Image: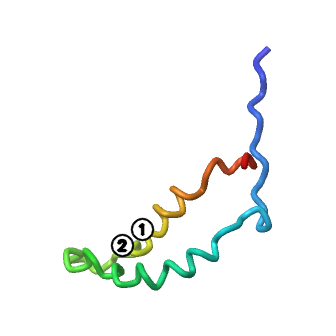
Amino acid sequence: MEAKPTSKPKIRERDVRGLKYFDQLAPLLERLHDVGCDRDSAGNRSLHFDNYCMLVLLYLGKGKGDGAQ
């Protein structure tokens, strides 16, 4: 018999910590908002460079996320 894949526990709001530091980083990254927009001839850009940098930082700082400390 094959073992059933174990489902990951759902992430609750109280499990998420450390996001207050992103509020402090946002003003520093704000100057990157319009970088690359001059090449956007269609004018439909929804992901700006400051948002992209914030997502990369979030990904790099997330750790394992399974409760291991």
Q: Is residue 64 above or below residue 59?
A: above
Q: Which residue is mark 2?
A: 49
Helix, strand, or loop for circle 1? Answer: helix
In the image as oriented, which residue stretches furthest toward the top? 1
Helix, strand, or loop for circle 2? Answer: helix
50 left or right, relative to 15: left
The amino acid at mark 2 is Phe
2 left or right, relative to 37: right
Q: At which x and y percent is residue 37?
A: 26, 78
Q: Which residue is mark 1?
A: 52
Q: Are the residues at dot 2 and dot 1 in contact (C-beta closer than 8 Å)? A: yes
Q: At which x and y percent is residue 27?
A: 46, 85
Name which residue lies at 77% across and 67% down: 13
Q: Is residue 12 above or below residue 37?
A: above
Q: Please state, as top left, top right, bottom left or bottom right, where the N terminus lies in the image.
A: top right
**Visual colour scheme:** rainbow
Q: CA distance from mark 2 to mark 1?
A: 5 Å
The amino acid at mark 1 is Tyr
Name which residue lies at 40% across and 72% down: 47
Name which residue lies at 64% across and 47% down: 64
Dot 2: few (<14), some (14–19), or many (≥20) neighbours within 10 Å?
some
Q: Nearer the viewer, residue 63 or 52?
A: 63
Q: Is residue 54 above or below residue 6?
A: below
Q: At which x and y percent is residue 17?
A: 70, 67
41 left or right, relative to 45: left
